[in-house]
Every structure is written in C-alpha cells, then in structure tokens.
C-alpha cells in the first residue's frame, strides 16, 4: 500500500517537473493543503482527541478557517509560490519561515483579542508552526530529489567539468548547471588562482587551486571541460591555463552573457554556453567608448553607411542602430548580403527606421539621387575593394572604386551639407607595397587635403579618417579560411613562417570608428592601438589545438610563399609619421604630411582617366608618383620602381 501511495505521488510530481512549467497556483494550493493538515495534526496532539471527533468541534472549525485564511494571505504576501520549486534557494526557505511564523503569531493575537470559542494554546501554535514549516520544506526537497532522479534517468552523456573562478557569476553558472534538467555537464568543482579559496567548498563542491595540475584532475575525475564565465577570467588565465587545456584536449566553454546568470537565475541559461573561439583568445579587454557623446551625435540624425553589407560596414550599422538615428541608410552593391542585413535589422531592431539601397559608389548619378532625396547628416564610408591579391591583378578597378568612388561620396557630402564624414581606411595604406594599400592611401590624401582646403573656407563639414589593421572573422580573412581548412582535414596554408599581422575584433574596430568619428575635428587621420602583432603561423597552431587536434600531425601547416603585393610585416605609421594622444587611450592622431588640394585633384583626375581607359601600367606609374612611399613587393610592378627617378618622385609628391 505504501509503495503504491509513493508511486502515485512520484508519478504526479514527475508530471509536474516534466511540464514546461508548473502553475504557481498549483504550488500555492498544495502549500495551503499542507498548512491545513498541520493545524489538524497539531490540534489532535494538543487536545488528545480522536480524529473522528475533531471535525465536530465548533471552535476547531473557526480555528481551521482562520488558519487557512492567514496562511493564504501570507503565502501571497511573501510570494512563497512564485519561484520554480526545483530551483528553491535559501531565500525561498526564509520566505516559508516568515510566512509560517507570521501566520501563527497573528493567530495567537486574534485568539487573545476576540476569544473565538477558545484561546489557542501556545503549544498548539508551536506544533502548527513546526509541522507547517517542516512540511513545506520536505515537499520541496521531495520535488528536488525526484527531479534529480528523473534527470539522472534522462542523462545520456555528461561532460565532467570544472568552473573557472569563484565569483558571484561563477557560482551562478554552477547553480544553473546543477539545476538544469537536461544538463550536459556534471560539475566536479571550481578552479581558482586564489590561494585563500584552496580546499574550501562552494555549493558542496570542492575548490581546487591551479597548482592542482589539470592533468591530475583529468586523471582522477576524468574531467573533459573547463567553463569560463567571462572573458576577463579568460584573459587572466590565457598564458598558462588555456595552453594546458589545449594540450590535454579539454573542451573550453564560455558564457555568452554572464550577467544574465545573476539577473535571470533559473531561466535555462546553460544554453548560453558556447565553445571558446580563436577570436576570444586574440581579442583584448572590452573597449569602452563615450556612448553618451556618440548618442548625442547620432540620435535623431540621418546617417548613411556605404559598404553596409560588408564585415565592417555591417557592424557599424549594428552599432549605430543602438543610438536611435531618425533614418539609417544602408548602401551597398551586394544584393544578397544587403538583403540579409535588412532581415537582421527587422528581427533585432523593431523600432529602427532604415532603408536598404542598392547602389554603386562609382555611379555618381545614383549617389546624387540618394544625397538629394535623404540629405544624410552623418556619412560613414566603408565601401571599398580590400583583397590584396585581387587588386594586384586589377589596379584600374581598385582606383575606380577606392579612389573615384570615395571622391564621389566626399564631394556629394559637401554639396548636400553633411555635418560629418568618416572614412574607414587601413594599415595597408602605410608605406604601401600593393595596389590595394596604395589606392586607400590616395583616397586618404584626397580626403585629408580637401578637408584642409574647405576648412579655410569655413565650411561646417568635418572629415575624419580611421586607420586600423586586420579584423578577426571578416569576410575572406584568415580565420574563416583556416576554420574551413581544419574542417576539411587540412592542410592549413600559410604564406610565410614569419609573416605577422595586427588583429582586432570587428565590434572593437567599429566602436573605435564611432568614437574617432565623434571626437575628430577635421582632416585628421586616427590610428588605433592594435596591440601586439601576431604570427599567422601561431594563429594556425592555436586554431588547430582549439579544434582538439595536433598541429603537423592531425593537421599539416603548408607554406605557400608570399602573395603578390604582400608584406611580411604591416605598419600603422610610416617612417615620417608620429602620433599624438587623444582623450581615448586606444586612439591616436597620426601627424601625416599635408598635400596641396589643387595639385592632388589634378593628379587624381589624371589617375582616374588612365584607369577608365584601362591603361594598367600608366595607372600604377601615376599611383607611385602620387604616393612616393609605394614600393611594390613580390609584384610584377616592381619594374616600375626602377624607372622612377628619386628626384621626380619627390617633386610630384612633395608639399605645395
């Protein structure tokens, strides 16, 4: 009989647990039923009567009624039924204690004041408080026990894991993992660098110091996962712990939004875990920007972004969308990527007023229609050809888009009274060794010289140029290519064992673009702190190890030789440029040479004319005249450098 009774209730509770959620009013009703049973049992023990006679006593009916009302009121007051029962915490215990104590205290006061048939004896109220409180706690413990039992039945594969850190966020993550029904991880303990926490226990789990070698923990407990709850912990540990994790082939997981673990406890946040990517290891600490100042600049304004479907332009769009422009114009030639960006904005930015416009920046009439129709006040110009090998084969196309296209947008911004123009350039414009970098440098020269020219005529528009290195994960960049090569079993192709590049995450780069665009005065070129340059070979090794594979054993690294126009090392400044600090520690102003606008305009007009005629050699020749530091490397255009006399180069490129 007892077994049947237990199976019946376990079946009921299992259905409650397996439901998507259990109604709080069911919990409220069950709690009220327990409190009613408590007063009955307490009354029996107090007056020592037969259960059959209890219901016949009029005073008890009054007591039963008042007790039920009081418990109902205080359950509602203290919200004992509002939480998810299987996630019950210490706070829930205090709520139950408070509601039971308050109900019995009021019951005593009412009995003394109104004398409703009899005065409840203190012993009855003590029994009632004890039975109700213990019953409520036991009820919740039974649910938790059955929940754990059901969970263990449904578990298929458990990864044994340790959580790095003992902060509030780390503990919140551990609680979520323990409470989640369809969990993928079984926690073994916490990992910390704090000596004071060594051998202590949190959530009844041991805390291990990093001196307890991970190899030891893996051998003893068969752990296969280390969970990081925020990037700060990741950066603090990356020199030693991450290397050890990769050597031991341990999976590394990172919380997507760690603060949600605290703010939304019990809301299935285990799904917020994701595998650590190479971008997490190479990125730097979160960059802070002046959001209030940027909001003041962009809020309520018409903002135009060229190249809006690209990696940089798209992220600029996402970040501008947060600052409530009156209208956001997305201009690009790529139909499908622009359509995808439109769908993304419709899904994630419901109140945003934006328009997607198919347009080529080389088509001045199309651009003129856009500017005359919408009168953009702020322009972010990110449209460009950017791939070095392709532009080395098509220098005329590089000029027509990167130079003439930029000139079209700049001139129209002046003509239609835009307030600010932000030009996205590249570190490849510094001492360029390839067509792409040289074309971007020429565009920089045009923007800078024009800015100085119009400033003397008191025109209100301000021109700002931003210059930074490679961005992690951009379209066609090294990381997506390496990732694809690893998925295909290798080999990973690296051009040279010593080649290095500066890297920055796309959101980080775009935040700095917005910040520089906000602080810029006129004609300035802003250089971003790119941190340390990274060997591409080391990047490949890291990515192979993150995939749980062994470099040069599971995945080969193949060196293919430098591509046309490719440098071993990129620069952010040339030998004659120095920087000045700004109000942001990550942004500097490059002190670059100035050019006479009329001479620049004459040279660029000639250059564009040559490009339109598809006269490749003459186009590249004129590029080298305009940018004297442009020396081709590993390129068919190296022969042109030998034909240029030093005197001729400096005469054409000098200040006027």
Image (cartoon, rainbow, N blue to C red):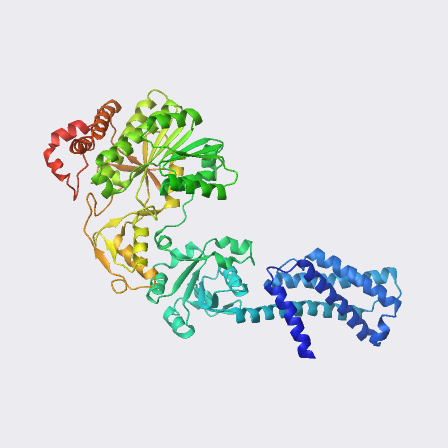
Image position of 369 with respect to 499: above or below:
above
Quadrant in the picture for residue 10: bottom right
Above-or-below relation of 526 to 502: above
Q: Residue furthest top?
A: 457
Task: Find residue 282 and report its horizontal and vertical position in percent.
Answer: 34, 52
Q: Is residue 72 left or right of residue 260?
A: right
In the rendering, at what x and y percent does residue 579 appear? 29, 38
Does residue 118 appear in the picture of this structure?
Answer: no
Which residue lies most toward the front here? 336
Q: Quadrant of the N terminus?
A: bottom right
Q: What is the number of callouts on the image?
A: 0
| In the image, residue 23 above or below residue 397 | below
The quadrant the C terminus occupies is: top left
Q: Is residue 69 visible?
A: yes
Q: Residue at x 32, y 65 (%)?
A: 247
- Residue at left 34%, top 65%? 244
Asked whether 246 or 618 is in front, the reply is 618
Q: Quadrant of residue 266?
A: bottom right
Query: Which residue is at 22% across, 57% downward?
Result: 558
Judged left or right of residue 183, residue 566 is: left
In front: 31, or 90? 31
Where is residue 139 shown, x and y percent of the image?
66, 68
Residue 18, percent from left and from top: 59, 64
Q: Residue at x 53, y 69 (%)?
A: 154
């Amino acid at each position: 009989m007892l077994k049947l009774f237990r199976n019946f209730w376990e079946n009921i509770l299992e259905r409650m647990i397996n439901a998507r959620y259990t109604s709080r009013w069911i919990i409220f009703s069950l709690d009220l039923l327990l409190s009613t049973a408590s007063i009955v049992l307490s009354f029996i023990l107090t007056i020592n009567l037969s259960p059959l006679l209890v219901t016949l006593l009029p005073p008890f009916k009054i007591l039963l009624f008042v007790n039920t009302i009081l418990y109902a009121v205080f359950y509602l007051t203290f919200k004992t039924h509002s939480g998810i029962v299987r996630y019950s915490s210490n706070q829930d215990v205090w709520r139950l204690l408070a509601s039971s104590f308050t109900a019995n205290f009021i019951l005593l006061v009412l009995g003394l004041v109104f004398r409703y048939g009899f005065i409840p004896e203190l012993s009855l109220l003590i029994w009632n408080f004890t039975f109700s409180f213990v019953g409520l706690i036991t009820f919740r413990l039974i649910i938790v026990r059955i929940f754990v039992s059901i969970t263990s039945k449904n578990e298929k594969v458990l990864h044994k894991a340790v959580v790095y850190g003992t902060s509030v966020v780390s503990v919140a993550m551990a609680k979520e993992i323990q409470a989640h029904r369809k969990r993928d991880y079984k926690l073994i303990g916490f990992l910390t660098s704090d000596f004071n926490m060594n051998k202590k226990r949190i959530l009844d789990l041991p805390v291990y110091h990093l001196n307890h070698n991970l190899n030891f923990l893996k051998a003893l407990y068969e752990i296969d996962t280390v969970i990081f709850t925020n990037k700060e912990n990741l950066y603090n540990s990356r020199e030693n712990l991450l290397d050890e994790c990769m050597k031991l082939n341990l999976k590394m997981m990172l919380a997507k939004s760690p603060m949600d673990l605290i703010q939304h406890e019990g809301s299935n946040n285990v799904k917020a875990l994701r595998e650590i990517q190479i971008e997490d290891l190479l990125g730097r600490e979160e960059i802070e920007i002046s959001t209030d100042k940027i909001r003041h600049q962009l809020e309520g304004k018409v903002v135009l972004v060229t190249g809006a479907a690209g990696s940089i332009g798209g992220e600029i769009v996402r970040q501008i969308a947060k600052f409530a422009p009156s209208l956001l114009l997305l201009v690009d030639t790529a139909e499908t990527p622009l359509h995808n960006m439109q769908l993304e904005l419709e899904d994630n930015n419901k109140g945003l007023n934006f328009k997607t416009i198919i347009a080529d920046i080389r088509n001045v009439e199309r651009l003129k229609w856009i500017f005359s129709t919408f009168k953009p006040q702020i322009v972010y110009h990110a449209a460009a050809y950017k791939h070095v090998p392709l532009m080395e084969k098509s220098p005329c196309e590089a000029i027509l888009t990167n130079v003439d296209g930029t000139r079209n947008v700049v001139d129209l911004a002046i003509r239609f009274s835009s307030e600010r123009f932000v030009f996205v350039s590249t570190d490849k414009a510094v001492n360029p060794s390839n067509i792409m970098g040289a074309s971007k440098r020429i565009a920089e020269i045009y923007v800078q010289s024009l800015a100085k020219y119009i400033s003397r005529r008191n025109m209100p528009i301000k021109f700002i140029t931003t210059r930074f290195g490679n961005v992690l994960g951009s379209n066609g960049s090294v990381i997506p290519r390496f990732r694809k090569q690893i998925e295909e079993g290798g080999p990973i192709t690296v051009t040279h064992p010593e080649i290095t590049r500066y890297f920055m995450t796309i959101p980080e780069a775009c935040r700095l673009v917005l910040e520089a665009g906000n602080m810029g005065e006129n004609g300035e070129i802003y250089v971003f702190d790119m941190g340390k340059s990274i060997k591409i070979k080391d990047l490949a090794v890291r990515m192979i190890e993150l995939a749980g594979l062994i470099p040069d054993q599971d995945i080969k690294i193949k060196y293919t030789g430098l591509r046309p126009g490719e440098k071993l090392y990129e620069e952010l400044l040339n030998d004659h440029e120095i920087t000045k600090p700004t109000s942001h520690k990550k942004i500097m102003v490059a002190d670059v040479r100035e050019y006479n606008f009329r001479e620049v305009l004459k040279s660029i007009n000639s250059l564009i004319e040559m490009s339109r005629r598809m006269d490749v050699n003459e186009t590249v020749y004129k590029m080298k005249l305009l940018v004297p530091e442009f020396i081709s490397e590993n390129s068919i255009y190296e022969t042109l450098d030998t034909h240029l006399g030093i005197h001729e180069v400096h005469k054409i490129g000098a200040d006027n």
